[in-house]
Amino acid sequence: MSPVTSPKEHRSILVSRLRFLGDVVLTTPLLRALRRAFPQAGIAYLAESPYIEVLVNHPDVDTLLPLHRQSRSAQLSTLRQLRRAHFDLTIDLFGNARSALLLWLTGARQRVGFDYRGRRLLYTTVVRRDARPKSAIEFHLETLRPLGVAPAGLETHLATSPDEDAWAVNYLHEKGVGAHERLAVVHAGASWPAKRWFAERFGELARRMGTELGTRVLLTTGPGEEELVARVAQVAPEAVVLEVLPIRRVMAVVKRCQVLVANDCGILHLGPALGTPTIGIFGPGEPEIWFPYSPAAGHYAVHQELDCSRCQRDFCEELRCMAAIQVDEVLAAVAHALQQGAARRPTVYTVGHSSLSLAEFVARLRAHGIRRVVDVRRFPTSRAFPHFSRDALAATLPAAGIDYRWLGQGLGGFRSGGYQGYMQTPDFAAALAELKSLAGELRTAVMCSEALFFRCHRRFIAEELVRQGWRVVHIIDESHTREHRLRQAHHSGQDMGGGSTDDQAEGHR
């Protein structure tokens, strides 16, 4: 194994997983780890079209490089882009001859890949595989080991834009779906016949989800699956059939729903990455590898262990594994996931006390049901507004029925080198973990002094929470909130967490 390049030298990074949809989604924890380790680096991603489209708007990718297999001229154009980019680090997560050659042609100083026969000669850093059982996510993260990069969680993440979210609302409205209905996506298709549960059972499931669980079912359709979905709809005539949609629009629909039910296919992986509880139906596949999602977040794999399980066949005349999965079993998993709706995307609020009186501040918290305040001011004093000092709040908020905690030592501003740099430290990670634990117990608001969250260091806390699958809501006043959206471009050479911003954010002292 060749010497590891110093992390400080990684300014331009290329990650490649050429295909398929689900495989690309499963690489997003690796992207998060790279972004945390190299916050100033430009990160590019190479994958075949259309799979790469799933990473549009992703906060940990700066450049998408689509590879069009059907167009020689487009492939040559992509190759020229790869050469011009002057990457100093490339990571091959696919490991076939094409991907290894493409990354070799970049001329990158460090090329990381697994020890596959022949292809390993094209890498400068070869990662040796072991026989230890691991999920697909853990397998990808193995490539970071020789770089000295620690994982940053195993959660997958995808992002939709506000325009895409608005499109989904309008589209479903045109389909007669109410804005406040409980929604479920049922996807009966799969690339390989052996991975498809029976259409009639999907139909029975969809029908009973409506009659027994009060859920409006949306039937998504993949290319060439129109006849299959029509058979499902015959059994469940109340379900809403959606036409074939581009992947970005499928993502927006899935994000709107309270549960996703799908076979072992690419669409399955959209749910966990978008915060939607997901039920995966597994026949010949290996759920421990391809469904690495937490039941605590409402994700369940339905699988019956037989003597022929995990055969990984694409075609099978018997389909014993699929026949063993009953509608009652899947319906029970859906019901359980719906019951965990509150845990689906844990939520934390933020608020700035500004120049409010104590009574006004408490009224604002109560208007949004806040039961705990976590103070992230590093210096929790205020000469202008002494009722917002740490000691005063520790006495007055509990008297008003609101718990008060101070985490300013670990999450406060005024950090040497800027707040974004501090976010890469173990101290920040430990304090954020404590915040998440506290927010998991009671409806919590992160508090600082600045009224406008975008002028406050708490916006960086919000960014990291959203990256980790949390929903962050900024309290504007008693009647208005704003959900935090990840910024699409924030990785320039400038540190937006510098001291001047934090000076403003922790004013009123």
Image (cartoon, helix red, strand yellow):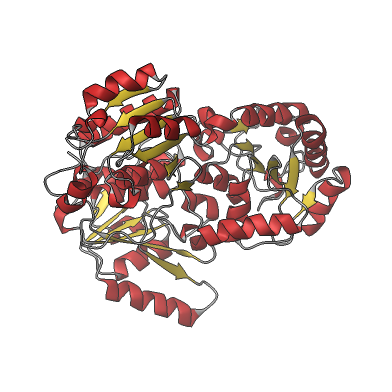
Residue displayed at 20% across by 56% down: 495
Query: Is residue 87 positioned above or below 395 on the image?
Result: below
Residue displayed at 74% across by 33% down: 320
Dividing the picture into quadrants, the one containing residue 327 is top right
Q: Nearer the viewer, residue 3 or 423?
A: 423
- Quarter containing the C terminus: top left
Q: Position of residue 303 (x, y in %)?
A: 64, 30
Query: Is residue 33 positioned above or below 175 on the image?
Result: above
**308 displayed left or right of 391:** right
Residue displayed at 40% across by 22% down: 402
Q: Residue furthest bottom?
A: 73
Instruction: Report how many numbered discs are placed on residues in the image.
Output: 0
**476 displayed left or right of 255:** left
Dividing the picture into quadrants, the one containing residue 134 is top left
**226 displayed left or right of 162:** right
Q: Nearer the viewer, residue 452 or 127?
A: 452
Q: Residue furthest left?
A: 416
Q: Position of residue 99 (x, y in %)?
A: 40, 62
Is residue 377 something that shows in the picture? Answer: yes
Q: Position of residue 64 (x, y in %)?
A: 41, 66
Q: Nearer the viewer, residue 312 or 426?
A: 426
Q: Position of residue 326 (x, y in %)?
A: 76, 29
Dividing the picture into quadrants, the one containing residue 493 is bottom left
**344 displayed left or right of 282:** left
Is residue 306 something that shows in the picture? Answer: no
Residue displayed at 24% across by 65% down: 108
Query: Is residue 346 positioned above or below 40 on the image?
Result: above
Q: Nearer the viewer, residue 117 or 476?
A: 476
Query: Is residue 435 positioned above or below 466 on the image?
Result: above
